[in-house]
Image: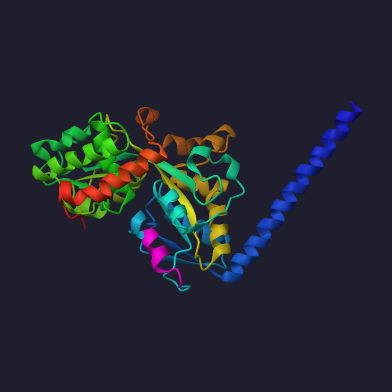
Amino acid sequence: MMTKRILFSAGAVLLASTALVRADAMADLEAAAKAEGALTTIALPHDWCGYGAVFDGFKAKYPGITVNELNPDAGSADEIEAIKANKDNKGPQAPDVIDVGLAFGPSSKADKLTQPYKVSTWDEIPDNIKDPDGYWYGDYYGVMSFLVNKDLVANPPADWADLLKPEYKGQVALAGDPRASNQAILAVHAAGLSTGAKAGADAGKAGLEFFAKLNKEGNFVPVIGKSGTLAQGATPIVAMWDYNALAAKDALAGNPPVDVVVPKTGVQAGVYVQAISAYAPHPNAAKLWMEYLYSDEGQLLWLKGYCHPARFNAMSKAGKIPQDLLDKLPPAASYEKAIFPTLEETDANKKVVTEGWDSVVGANVK
């Protein structure tokens, strides 16, 4: 018994010392970040995944750091291009951090556009959604859904195939340009999956054929769909991530009334990833931003924005997720048929869709 007590005491000392080391490291990182004085983000609209509250939380916790937000409506490809275009620029147009679709993580690493960093909660990020060396790591996921203006759409579509019905002429849009936006690229994949096509290149090809038919029938609207265009009637039905649709529903507050529909088939789950630019003008502020995002506070703010954060399973097991947040999410049944494409399948689809949209569909989305 004495031996056990000694071992326990030594273990407690080790844990305490480890915690002190982490606290010292965080204090040093915070000081270095404040010395830099700024952080530049890109493509983070405030109504996407609760980012408005995330920005507010970060600024409140670290008041010495000014946050510069670039092009909130940019797509994943635009973020990558912004890094490339600003390799030698240390000014406000050079992003420190990016939040991109899963397929863009490995490619940005391969192009040497990101730098490695492992947050203190690294072990709670699932291995299958992070680079083992820390060049990119999953942050959150959701499923593809339809945001529907009920004032203009009497019978909301229940599945992808429904979108081809004559009653939806001039009403269907994507929430991005499928040649650059991860959200739109995966919406095309989801449509392909709904036809029974295999995830990856096959679903990408089937999805392009689906949208070509949708465009030929006159149902597709080549306008990037948002809550504003939906409310104005320009895009009464928009395919978008469920968390964006639910946030839009909250923001519209019944004007107009909307439905958020998770389709019966082709339930596409999409993971996004974080990374720090290899050319970040403020590398320490970027690391501090990552620490905040992957802290309990940051993860719960994403969940409040209807996104399932990367640490969801670990935090749920530890009893760290308030029940009221869980109650606001779509029913668990909505996710039971969710398909999580592998990294290889996601990358194959991206190639097919981005390279084939113009020739197969021929709609200039903007």
Q: What span is colored magenta in the figure?
A: 79-88
**Majority secondary structure of magenta residues:** helix
Residue 266 percent location from the top left of the image = 28, 33
In this rendering, position of residue 117 left or right of residue 347: right
The one of 303 and 313 positioned closer to us in this rendering: 313
Residue 268 percent location from the top left of the image = 33, 36
Q: Quadrant of residue 8?
A: top right
The C terminus, quarter of image: bottom left
Q: How many marks?
A: 0
The one of 262 and 277 positioned closer to us in this rendering: 277
Residue 12 percent location from the top left of the image = 79, 40
Residue 2 percent location from the top left of the image = 91, 29
The one of 43 and 359 positioned closer to us in this rendering: 359
Residue at the spot 52% in from the left edge and 52% down from the top edge: 135
Residue at the spot 66% in from the left edge and 57% down from the top edge: 26
Q: Is residue 342 magenta?
A: no
Is residue 150 at all visible to an observer of this figure? no
Is residue 9 at all visible to an observer of this figure? yes
